[in-house]
Amino acid sequence: MTTPINLNKARKARTKAEKEQRAKENRAKFGQPKSVKSLEAARAEKQARLTESHKLTPPDPKDG
């Protein structure tokens, strides 16, 4: 026969693990210095401009 488990302890352990995971994600998201955040934002903006400049525009139907 298997040993019974305490559902209250299992529930608390699961909640604790979820909170730890959320804390880990928040540390990665909000734990960076302002200089690193601004550098990442500048890189993202530059990449967006580069991507936008390489897009082909459809031909104008009036020209043809």
Image: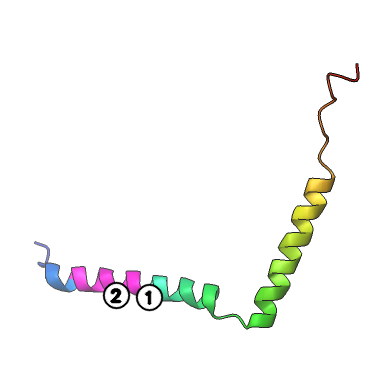
Decide which of 7, 51 is in the foreground and name it: 51
Label 1: few (<14), some (14–19) or many (≥20) C-alpha neighbours in 10 Å: few
Asked if residue 11 lies in the magenta stretch, the reply is: yes
Q: Residue at x 75, y 54 (%)?
A: 48
Image: 42 above or below 60: below
Amino acid carrying mark 1 in the image: Glu
Where on the picture, by quarter, is residue 46? bottom right
Tag 2 secondary structure: helix
Here the colouring is rainbow
The answer to whether residue 53 of the structure is visible from this angle is: yes
Contact between marks 2 and 1 (CB within 8 A): the answer is yes
- The Cα–Cα distance between marks 2 and 1, rounded to whole angstroms, is 6 Å
The residue located at (62%, 83%) in the rendering is: 33
Location of mark 1 (residue) = 20
x then y, percent, for residue 57: 82, 33
Tell me if I can see residue 5 in this picture: no
Residue 2 in the magenta stretch? The answer is no
Alpha-carbon neighbours of circle 2 within 10 Å: few (<14), some, or many (≥20)?
few
x and y percent of residue 34 in the render? 64, 81
Q: Which residue is mark 2?
A: 16
**Compared with residue 48, is residue 24 higher up or lower down, i.e. above or below?**
below
Decide if residue 28 is on the left or right side of residue 20: right
State the residue in front, 24 or 30.
30
| Residue 59 in the figure: left or right of residue 26 | right
Quadrant for the C terminus, please. top right
Pick whichever, 6 or 27, lies toward us: 27
For the record, the magenta segment spans 10-20
Q: Position of residue 43 (x, y in %)?
A: 75, 65
- Dominant SS in magenta: helix
